């Protein structure tokens, strides 16, 4: 059973359609990265999955059921963007309150405070918390009751680099335990290694969906190879220019050449024979893919409008 | 049921934490004792006069205060959580919107009920202990009725506050509207009724007019507390109409309950339609 299934889901506010014909599934124990610019429909998608919005059209199932059902909500954790709490309550009081509402055991409260590194600040009022601490309290709140599906909206905002790394490690651990996770983030380079699949939204349309390998091959973005210590660099540059491969000289004796993915191995073979001192292969990153699909979305919509 | 109780418990502990409960109780106690002893100062007397006079003064006071306090306590119940961002979180929990509303009502209702019991209860106790020759049975009956109806009046205005809070999108508009509601029911309604009475010069069906009092919960509250005293005290203004009202006292109580129920029902409908 899939954790989340959306079939042809559409969401309208008045005359404005913010989600168009969205088909999306998240399997059990899968981490889906949901990306898009501000206002692309990420938060709306999360709200649909949370049952806060009723889709204008299409079908939606969460953990095999209607997301309004209380038994679904008990197995679901949500960290909203810019999470806020009751300022007058302490961290522990806040978490205890939400634990009672979710029917989670009281023993989880201290456990989770420990887990997110708030044990020392548990007695302090949330009013005195920094942005990062509130974010961590929000995460603890989302983890109450060991949810089977976790929705994280910009979880790394306000976190320091170490806390961010810890969050990613936690995501990896939860995935191993079979938790399904939907992760919205602008920190593309950070989340890249921690997601199974990426979904890219633009203006309410799903632009791309798949694991990074398949997205890369579909985008056919060039692979960049950097080398140092080649003899006769000018000759190499000339040769690549003749072959139609974009190339440039970098700092020191480093050169960079870009090749379509199909020609990658042949080029590498040739380059290795020239015995460089050092060599790096740069696959298109999630950021490159995101840029590519966003540009595509723009030209597509320009084509439609023309 | 458990969910409702959890929310109610938080509201109650918030009321204790921010000293609302203490402040309201103190206010009630001081005003009640003050009125009991100084209420007759205008006629040149100092000291406790009679139970009917005291209750009549207290009822006038509660007519002003109770709605105001209830509205202040609850006007931000929904819109405040929405602005604070916690409503979004609550609605993703295994809770119905009706449960959230009822939980808030139960919590706020307990605060008002406890404050009334403590505040006016202390005053009744002081009268019972300090005044000689006071009929204790009469005192208990009159104060009991007064405290119960005050609480009920407070609940009606809690429900009105939830209606406002569910309908608007900003806390400040809820506060403004709450003041408007208070003005309407506490001041404007009676004046308008008197105006109708005067301007119509008797052409208005005199049978109908007393029934209009039931449209204002604060008037119903005063009718409950002014009736039943043999020496019908100084009933002034629209309250004089109440004497013509051919309804039993049970109906008056029922009327207050209906107002609270109606307010909650409208609040629920508005809250259910509210978009997050």
Image: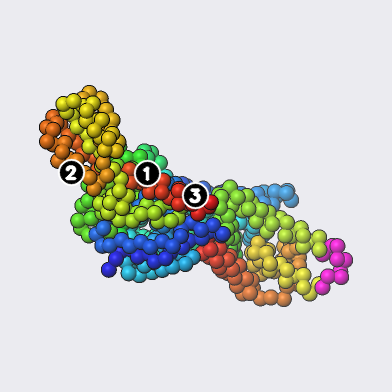
Of circles 3 and 2, which is in front? 2
In the image, taking residue B192 as reference, residue A33 lies left or right, namely left
Give the percent coordinates (x, y) of residue B158.
Answer: 55, 59
Q: Main secondary structure of the magenta part?
A: loop
Packing grade of label 3 (10 A; few <14, some 14-19, many >=20) is: few
Viewer-closest of B194 and B158: B158
Sequence order check, earlier mark of 1 and 3:
1
Q: CA distance from mark 3 to mark 2?
A: 37 Å
Q: What count of labels does the image hold?
A: 3
Q: Are marks 3 and 2 in contact (CB under 8 Å)?
A: no
Q: Are marks 1 and 3 on the same chain?
A: yes
Q: Secondary structure at mark 3?
A: helix
Q: Quadrant of the N terminus of chain A?
A: bottom left
Q: Secondary structure at mark 1?
A: helix
Magenta stretch: give its range. Answer: B197-205
The chain ID associated with circle 2 is A
| Number of the label disc, if any, that sits on residue A231 | none
Q: Secondary structure at mark 2?
A: helix
Residue underneath mark 2: A266
Of circles 1 and 2, which is in front? 2
In the image, taking residue A280 as reference, residue B17 lies left or right, namely right
What residue sits 59% from the left and 68% below the top? Answer: B262
Residue underneath mark 3: A302
Find the residue positioned furthest to the top: A252
The chain ID associated with circle 1 is A
Give the percent coordinates (x, y) of residue A30.
Answer: 26, 58
Viewer-closest of A69 and A212: A212
Q: CA distance from mark 1 to mark 2?
A: 27 Å
What residue sits 68% from the left and 68% below the top? Answer: B214
Sequence order check, earlier mark of 1 and 2:
2
Sequence order check, earlier mark of 3 and 2:
2
Residue underneath mark 1: A291
């Amino acid at each position: 059973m899939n954790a989340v299934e959306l079939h042809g889901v559409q969401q309208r506010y008045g005359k404005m359609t913010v989600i168009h014909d969205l088909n999306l599934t998240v399997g059990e124990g899968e981490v889906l990265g949901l990306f898009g610019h501000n206002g692309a429909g990420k938060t709306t998608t999360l709200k649909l999955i949370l049952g806060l919005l009723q889709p204008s059209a299409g079908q939606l199932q969460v953990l095999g059921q209607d997301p309004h059902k209380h038994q679904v909500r008990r197995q679901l954790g949500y960290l909203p963007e810019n999470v806020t709490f009751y300022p007058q309550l302490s961290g522990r009081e806040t978490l205890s309150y939400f634990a009672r509402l979710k029917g989670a055991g009281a023993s989880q409260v201290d456990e989770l405070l420990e887990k997110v590194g708030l044990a020392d600040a548990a007695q302090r009022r949330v009013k005195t918390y920094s942005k990062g601490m509130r974010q961590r309290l929000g995460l603890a709140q989302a983890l109450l009751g060991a949810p089977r599906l976790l929705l994280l909206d910009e979880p790394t905002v306000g976190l320091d680099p170490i806390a961010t790394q810890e969050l990613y490690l936690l995501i990896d651990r939860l995935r191993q335990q079979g938790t399904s996770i939907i992760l919205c983030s602008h920190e593309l380079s950070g989340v890249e290694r921690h997601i199974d699949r990426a979904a890219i939204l633009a203006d309410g349309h799903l632009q791309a969906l798949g694991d990074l390998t398949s997205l890369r091959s579909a985008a056919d973005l060039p692979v960049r190879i950097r080398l140092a210590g080649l003899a006769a660099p000018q000759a190499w540059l000339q040769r690549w220019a003749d072959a139609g491969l974009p190339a440039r000289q970098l700092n020191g004796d480093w050169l960079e050449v870009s090749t379509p993915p199909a020609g990658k191995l042949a080029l590498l073979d040739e380059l290795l024979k020239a015995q460089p001192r050092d060599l790096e292969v740069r696959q298109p990153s999630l950021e490159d893919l995101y840029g590519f699909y966003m540009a595509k979305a723009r030209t597509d919509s320009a084509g439609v409008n023309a | 049921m458990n969910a409702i109780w959890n929310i109610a418990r938080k509201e109650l502990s918030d009321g204790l934490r921010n000293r609302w409960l203490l402040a309201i109780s103190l206010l009630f106690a001081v005003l009640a004792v003050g009125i009991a002893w100084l209420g007759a100062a205008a006629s040149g007397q100092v000291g406790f006069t009679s139970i009917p006079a005291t209750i009549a003064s207290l009822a006038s006071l509660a007519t002003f205060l109770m709605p105001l306090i209830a509205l202040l306590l609850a006007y931000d119940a929904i819109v405040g959580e929405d602005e604070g961002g916690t409503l979004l979180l609550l609605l993703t929990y295994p809770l119905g919107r009706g449960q959230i509303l009822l939980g808030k009502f139960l919590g706020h209702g307990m605060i008002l009920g406890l404050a009334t019991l403590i505040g006016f209860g202390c005053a009744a106790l002081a009268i019972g202990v300090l005044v000689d020759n006071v009929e204790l049975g009469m005192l208990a009956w009159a104060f009991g009725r007064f405290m119960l109806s005050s609480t009920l009046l407070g609940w009606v205005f809690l429900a009105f506050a939830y209606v406002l809070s569910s309908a608007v999108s900003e806390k400040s508009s809820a506060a403004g509207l709450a003041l408007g509601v208070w003005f309407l029911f506490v001041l404007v309604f009676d004046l308008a009724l008197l105006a109708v009475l005067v301007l119509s010069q008797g052409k208005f069906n005199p049978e109908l007019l007393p029934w209009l009092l039931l449209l204002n919960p604060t008037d119903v509250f005063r009718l409950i507390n002014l009736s039943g005293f043999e020496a019908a005290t100084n009933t002034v203004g629209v309250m004089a109409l109440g004497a013509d009202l051919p309804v039993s006292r049970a109906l008056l109580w029922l009327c207050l309950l209906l107002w609270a129920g109606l307010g909650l029902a409208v609040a629920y409908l508005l809250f259910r339609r509210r978009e997050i």
